[in-house]
Amino acid sequence: MLQADHWTWRRVPGQYATPTNLDVASAKQFLAQNHIRYVLAQFADIYGVAKSKAVPVEHFEDVLTDGVGFAGGGVFGMRLAPHEPEYMVVGDLSTLTLVPWAPGYARVMGTGMVNGKPHPIDTRNILKAQMARLSERGWTLLTGIEPEFSLLQKLPDGSIAPFDSTDSLQKPAYDYRGLSRARTFLERVTECLQSLGIDVYQIDHEDANGQYEINFKYADALTSADQILLFKMAAAEIAHELGAVCSFMPKPKSSMTGNGMHIHCSIADAAGKNIFHDASDKNGMGLSQLAYHFIGGLLTHARALTALLAPSVNSYKRLVIGRTASGTTWAPVFVAYGDNNRTAMVRIPYGRIELRVGDSGMNPYLAQAALIAAGLDGIDRKLDPGPPQNINFYALTPAEIKAKNIQILPQSLSEAIEALDQSELFRKTLGGDFIDEFVSLKREEWLDYHRHVSDWETQRYLSFF
């Protein structure tokens, strides 16, 4: 259990926030004022994992001009062979951020370039391309991403357990003691984010033992993805310092709920107005016709979309039909939407949309790029999502679900990847080379898993026959 006397570290909200509209000279001054010695030049690989080089601050300007070179063949998903040109990360000055848990360090996200051109398989570039499609219409996608995670410890026998050994309730959601006894970790992560000007508005104990969620204010989709990457870095390193493991694995334990990463979204016009909102909505959900078409796109492309929102073998231990020890999985597999309906893949908080399929293992750049592509297809083709389904899908039998003509999301990575591979929309919008690379890597992942002989199989079959 985390003890408060292990930690005397405190930050003032906004204390280390990066000034807006920086130029190179003021950025250098900002770094000097904060005694920065190294700048991490970063990008996200195809899995959404932060990749970095540490650059001495004296060479910070080089990050913004020439960029930082990486051997593309050493990173998953770049489609760059060892004999091909360097993958260059050219720093985006607007992303310059201090790293409060590592004094003396800052980080800057970059644009992935090859031969002087944006690399089409760089996941941040893929999201930027989809955001540009919105920008052509005068629109911006605003998202609030909700990361769930597990705070765990590794036991001597190699198994895992909640880091707080007293966190053992059958139904622990919102439990005060479970929240309080992890407060050292939770406060430190929260205050790290707050010190950078990221507005954290609530923290809670989730539905599984050792599971938590920290929510911060919405932003444009690119900023949201950058912040999720920063949050994961902070959570992992602070947990490590405290002797814990912060896991974003979608389903760490079969009997409990998994770690979701729900995406709340709306589209703002050039004036900042939420064009998903319409108070005259006859369904009482505050949605505009454009929002309904957007939902139609999400539902139409749900099966292929799932491959990018739930991108691992383990994801499909979370996306199942059934119950857990606490009563429900909270992971909707039903291709439907409804008013505040947490059993459907799309929930409607008044005037906006929540996509609940994604898990904490997703790449937030790819997930949001696919969200835009599917939603815009719904808008352009005026796809009808049908009537809202304000029912508890968990309470229905398979026959009742089938009678309502409700589809089920893929139940394995293999099934989802096949749907993605066949998607003309995602090949066209996200790029055929990217889809081929992602599908290839994920087929290898599925094959490795499928050929692995698990403990379950040994226990069941060793002496069975």
Image (cartoon, rainbow, N blue to C red):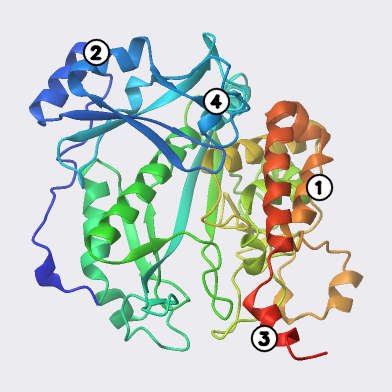
Which residue is nearer to you in this view: 44 or 128?
44
Between the residue at mark 2 and the residue at mark 1, the CA separation in whole angstroms equals 45 Å
Which of the 4 image quadrants contains residue 20?
top left
Write the residue at 55% across / 28% down. 73
**First in residue order: circle 2 vs circle 4:** 2
Q: Mark 2 points at which residue?
A: 24
Residue 401: % across, % down: 84, 72
Q: Earlier in the sequence, mark 3 or mark 1?
A: 1
Secondary structure beneath label 3: helix
Q: Name the residue under label 4.
A: 125
Is 409 drawn above or below residue 393 in the view shown? above
In the displayed structure, does residue 215 sit left or right of residue 414? left
Residue at the spot of label 1: 419
User: What's the mark number on residue 459?
Assistant: 3
Instruction: Calculate the distance from the C-alpha at mark 4 to the C-alpha at mark 3.
Output: 46 Å
Residue type of the residue flagged with mark 3: Gln
* SS class, disc 2: helix
Answer few, some or many: residues within 10 Å of disc 3's Cα (few below 14, many 20 plus, some between 14 and 19). Answer: few
- Residue 316 pos. (x, y %): 67, 63
First-in-chain label (2 vs 1): 2
| Local SS, label 4 | helix
Residue sitting at 30 percent across and 47 percent down? 199
Residue 37: x, y in percent? 15, 29
Instruction: From the top left corner, tell me how far across and down residue 95 is, in percent.
Output: 34, 28
How far apart, in angstroms, are the residues tagged by discs 3 and 1? Answer: 33 Å
Which residue appears at 51% of the width and 32% of the height?
Answer: 74
Relative to residue 139, is residue 304 depicted above or below? below
Kind of residue indicated by mark 4 = Asn
Identify residue type, mark 2: Val
The C terminus appears in which quarter of the rendering? bottom right
Q: In this view, does 27 lie above or below 78?
A: above
